[in-house]
């Protein structure tokens, strides 16, 4: 009887925590399935390579904004895939004009991103569809933003709220950090299994 008195409260607390964590994970996954990110990796961490990465970022955003004003995530991914060689040419034209000794490789992929705090919201850690631009070796610090909904393309007028549910918007605009840390830990454990 004593074991039941001890076990029952522990089991109930565990069940409540698991239920809440499950809701957090479901909302996090729903958000990651509605976002298309841009991920630019520098050749290395040298000052030169990091500056080239930022200059390429600006050049890319200025020269591809008209490509990415789609109304759905699927359209955006399809547009990116259909324009891979064009996007790669844009990047390599920039690199060549700056006498860089390397080129860029562009792909559409699904990759892991850690929690990222923006001005008005926080995206939870998880696997996101992305347009990945690897400059040279692609082994330097990276830069990323959100192409859909269009957070980093000023020519498009969408916002996160146009594509997220109220629950998802509450989730990403709250400053409750422990839930994001729990998601990161869970995703790291899941990816290492």
Image: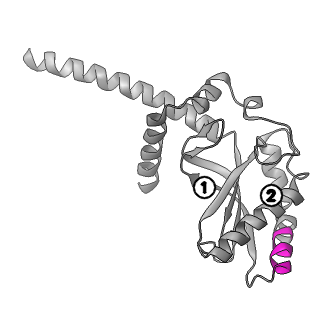
Vertical placement of 73 versus 130: above or below?
above
Can residue 43 be seen by looking at this rendering? no
Identity of the residue drawn at 81% across and 55% down: 80
- Distance between the Cα atoms at labels 1 and 2? 16 Å
User: Mark 1 or mark 2, which has the lower sequence index?
Assistant: 2
Identity of the residue drawn at 70% across and 43% down: 35
Vertical placement of 53 versus 24: above or below?
below
Give coordinates of residue 109: x percent, y percent: 67, 57
Q: Which segment is the magenta one?
A: 90-98
Give coordinates of residue 75: x percent, y percent: 83, 45
Location of the N terminus by quadrant is: top left
Give coordinates of residue 99: x percent, y percent: 80, 83
Q: Could you say which is closer to the camera, residue 103 or residue 72? A: 103
Number of numbered discs on residues: 2
Quarter of image, res 134:
bottom right
Can residue 44 be seen by looking at this rendering? yes
Q: Which mark is residue 111?
A: 1
Indicate left or right for 68 with 32 as reference: right
Say what secondary structure mark 2 lies in: helix
Q: Which mark is residue 81?
A: 2
Location of the C terminus by quadrant is: bottom left
Is residue 140 shown in magenta?
A: no
Say what secondary structure mark 1 lies in: strand
Other-residue count near label 2 (Cα within 10 Å), few / some / many at <14 / 14–19 / ≥20: some
Vertical placement of 94 versus 71: above or below?
below
């Amino acid at each position: 009887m004593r074991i039941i008195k001890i076990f029952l409260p522990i089991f109930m607390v565990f069940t409540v925590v698991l239920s809440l964590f499950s809701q957090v994970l479901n909302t996090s996954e729903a958000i990651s399935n509605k976002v298309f990110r841009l991920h630019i990796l520098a050749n290395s961490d040298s000052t030169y390579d990091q500056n080239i990465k930022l200059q390429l970022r600006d050049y890319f955003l200025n020269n591809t904004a008209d490509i990415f004003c789609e109304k759905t995530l699927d359209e955006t991914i399809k547009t990116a895939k259909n324009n891979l060689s064009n996007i790669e040419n844009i990047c390599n034209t920039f690199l060549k004009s700056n006498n860089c000794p390397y080129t860029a490789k562009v792909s559409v992929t699904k990759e892991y991103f850690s929690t990222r705090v923006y001005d008005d919201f926080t995206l939870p850690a998880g696997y996101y569809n992305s347009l990945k631009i690897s400059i040279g070796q692609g082994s330097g610090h990276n830069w990323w933003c959100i192409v859909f909904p269009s957070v980093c393309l000023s020519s498009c007028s969408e916002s996160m709220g146009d594509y997220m549910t109220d629950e998802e918007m509450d989730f990403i605009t709250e400053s409750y950090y422990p839930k994001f840390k729990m998601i990161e830990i869970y995703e790291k454990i899941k990816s290492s299994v």
